[in-house]
Image (spheres, rainbow, N blue to C red):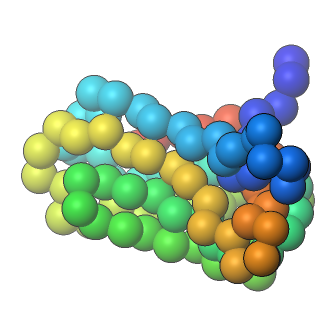
Amino acid sequence: HQPNFVGRNNANPDYGPIVVQMTGVPAATRSMQLQVLGVAGSGQLVVLSGKQRFPVPFSELKAGQTVTVDLPKRNQQTELTLLVESSRADKVGYVVYQQITLN
């Protein structure tokens, strides 16, 4: 199984960032777990739920750990979007993950 990543792994102008969108996420979902395999670059992983933003700095992400992002105040079915906001000038920064679980 090939691991997945979120963000941008190449500074070449022909490459852009990878974003993950999950549609039809039930309103009852209160957290997301991300099984992290690795992190590169600098910045933060951001989970968007409607207009809400849930940032996780790269400094809190470690290979081999499962990170939980709490998603409070979700009262309607919306999509969840995972993206990386890189703080590097070339915008390279990404998170490699094995699995995403919603609870």
| Residue 71: x %, y % from top left | 34, 61
Residue at point 28%, 27% (across, down): 24
**Residue 22 in the image: x percent, y percent?**
42, 33
In the image, residue 69 sits, relative to residue 29, either above or below, namely below
Q: Quadrant of the N terminus?
A: top right
Residue farthest to the top? 1
Q: Nearer the viewer, residue 75 or 94?
A: 94
Q: Position of residue 81 (x, y in %)?
A: 44, 46
Residue 97 visible: no
Q: Is residue 35 left or right of residue 40?
A: left
Point out the residue furthest to the left here.
75
Residue at 69% from the left image edge and 44% from the top image edge: 16
| Residue occupying the point 28% across, 65% down | 52
Q: Nearer the viewer, residue 8 or 52?
A: 8
Instruction: Mark yes or no: residue 80 visible.
Output: yes
Above or below 46: residue 10? above
